[in-house]
Every structure is written in structure tokens, then in C-alpha cells.
Image (cartoon, rainbow, N blue to C red):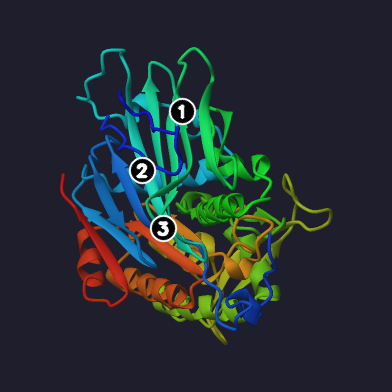
Amino acid sequence: MDATLDAARPSATVSSLADSPSSCADSPSASTSLSAGGGVAARPAVTELRLSAFGRHRSAVFPLGPVTLFAGASGSGKSQALAAYEALARLASGACLEEVFPDPPARVPERAVPDADGRRGFRLGCTVDGPAGSVRLDLAVQAEPGLRIVGERLSQDGEVLLGTALRDPRRRSVQAAWLTGGAIGVTRAPLPDDRLGTALLPLRVAGATAGQRRVLAAAEQVVVALRSVFPCDPRPGRMRAPVPQADGRLRGDCGNLADVLRRTRHECSTRHALLAAAARTGCAGPVTALDVRTVTGTGPGARSGGGLVAGVLDRGPGRPATDLGRLGAGELRFLALALVLLTGPGVLEVDPAADVLAARQALTVLADGLDRGLDRRQSAELLRLALLSGARGHVRLAASVGEDTAGTARGLPGVSVVDLTP
């Protein structure tokens, strides 16, 4: 697998890789921020995903907008594309390769032939647009015989800012070189071969020269965009029972939805009202409001004296409320996804860059099977909410959908549909 990136000269063009918690309170600052020039500050966002020899994808380039839907038959690679995005996000958050790819050979095409040294692997990368301009990140990962990053490239406008290459297979490190500028030109040092070098740069680069500051700005932009990701897969079976009162941050499986509703009802009145309005569209029968009730008893993790809480639909005067546990699986998935699209990192269990203002970050929701178990009305409402959040700039959506939802989305301005073929 010839997947090494030429890192010897960051100023030169690198050869191609081989084919082988914030506040929940409703506030204008939660969605907008003014830059020094008086305009709206740009939020870093992933605008392109690139995959090669990754699952069924070969030399694939996927443009990503505020709302991007992957459509296609079973086996076309929709889930693999989202898995690659999530893998980049986890690496940018500091995870090691073994955590991100527990079964690396499964990511390599089944019929991929190893090179003369018995190596097989894959490539993945992305482009991040933001205040620093357009920045590219490309990775070459060796899956066999051992899992390691054998090449990484951070570049902008055709110039390599950081490049790494595996020089000695016997060492658990790669040789890295990054732009310094001035009399030195380039700084070289070893970096671990199981972590994303771009995420380690702030610990290695002082920012004393214009070149170093450019490298840091590009690396920060990529890390901020990739870390601000929330993979979401609501599991209705985990959402029916009462849950302990805790921190009110929604987990990826949305099993603690009732506790989050308790929090948003008191702290995020505007967004909670929007969610209740969405529930009137996506849930059967009349819906006046979303509420919670306290359940007698305690559970593991419950606050002292806090007990358990259950979510309920208020049906209006003279009508009994309906526990969320009595709703259909589609209704529960709809409510959870609507909540995710209407809120942000302060309410979701996500770990964005702590040293960057929330107003300068755009959260990307990854939803594999967004419309699973939903009817057309529910799917259409989720698309409307996604477009609403996308227009505000604070929440983006990348999801896989079925053909019915894709057909509806193709007629909506602002939605990008990526059609894949098996």
C-alpha cells in the first residue's frame, strides 16, 4: 500500500495518496457573533468529504452543504460515508486509531490486493472552510499488517502546511514537517503514528512566526469544525422508561430524552416552544405542550431527592396527558431528532473546542437513517427544521435517507442530495 505522503518539503506540492458545555439559555449570542470588522463571524464547517479505498468508495468526493442527504440502495455506501465523517471527528477530538477503527480490515475493500510488503489500507480526507480560508486535510491509513497513519497532509491553496510520512516501519512514529517561515523554513519532528498530527500541532507550534501562525490557524479551523459533531441514532426502546434527573445533556441514543425535556422546559423556553410546535406536526392527536412529570422512586445516577422524570404530551384541557412511553417508535424518533436540530452543544452530549466561542462554531449532526420508521409528514418536518437551523448557521445536518425522503428533498432549495449507486 503506497499511502505515504511526502512530508520532506511542506512548501512543495505533495504527491497524491495511493488508492489503496455552553449555556442553554435563549440568547442572540447563541446563534450570531460579530467579528472585529462588524460582520457576522464565519463558522468553520466541513464542506467536502473525500474517500478512497474506504469500503465501497474509490476516489469519491462528496460536497457537503448545510443540509446534505445521502441516498441510494442498500449497500451503496451511505453509512460508510457518515462513518468516515465520524472517524475524522473522533480523531480530531484526540482519539487514537484503535478506538476509531476497532476492525480496520473491514474498512478496506474486500477485493483490495495488498502491495509487495503485504500492506492494505484506505484514504480519507475533508475540506474545511472558515475564517482561515479553505483548508484540506488528507490521511492515509494502513490497516494491515498493523494499524497506523502512514501519511497526513494539511494544506491550503496548494501549499503544504503540515506533512507526515512513515520513514521507518519499525518505529511507532512518523516524520513530520510543518511550515515555520523565516530563516528556518521548515520544522521537523517525530509524531505518533496512531493520532491525528493536526490535532497535536497546538502543543508543538509556538506561533512565533507568520508561518507558524498560519499553520496554527489552519489546524485550529479543521479541529474546531471536526470536533463539533454529534452522531445521533435515537433508540425508542431506551426512551420509554422514566430516567434519573441528571445534567440534561442529550446522549447519542436519546435514551435520556425526558431529562433533557425537563431542562429545556425551564432554561430554553423559545426552543422548547418550537419543539412543541413540531410535535403538533409529528405526533398523532392534539398536542398543546411538552411537559415532564416526576415519578416516585429513585434510580442509579439520580440526584439526591430528585427521583425520576418521564416525558408527557399535554393534550389540552379536559384531555389526559400521554406518557412518551406510550408513543410509537416513529413518534419518539421524530421528537428526539427535532430536539437535536433545534438546539446545540449546550444541550447535546458533545465536546466542542472549549477555547472557541460557541457562536463561532457550527454543530454538525450525523444521522444514519434519518427517516427510519418515520412517515412522510414527519420526514418533511425534520427537513424543514434542518433548513431553519442551517439558515441560522449554527446547526448542519449530514444524514442518510430513503428514496421517499430523498425525492421530497430534491425539490427543496438548500438541500443537497448525494445519490449513490451500489
Residue 260 location, quadrant: bottom right
The answer to whether 365 appears left or right of 116 in the picture is: right
In x, y percent, where is residue 281?
40, 78
Q: Residue 348: x percent and y percent? A: 59, 59
113 relative position to 356: left or right: left
Give the quadrant of residue 32. Answer: bottom right
Of labels 2 and 1, the one closer to you: 2
- Which residue does the image show at 36% across and 39% down from the upper left? 14
Residue depth check, mark 3 versus mark 2: number of the one nearer the observer: 2
Q: What is the secondary structure assignment of the residue under circle 3?
A: helix
Tag 1 secondary structure: loop
Q: Earlier in the sequence, mark 2 or mark 1?
A: 2
- Between the residue at mark 1 and the residue at mark 3, the CA separation in whole angstroms equals 30 Å
User: Would you say residue 196 is visible in this rendering?
Assistant: no
Q: Earlier in the sequence, mark 1 or mark 3?
A: 1
Residue at image mark 3: 329
**Amino acid type for the residue under numbered disc 1:** Pro
Q: Nearer the viewer, residue 236 or 395?
A: 395
Residue 145 visible? The answer is: yes
Quarter placement of the N terminus: top left
- Residue 13 is tagged as 2
Residue 200 screen position, x and y as percent: 60, 40
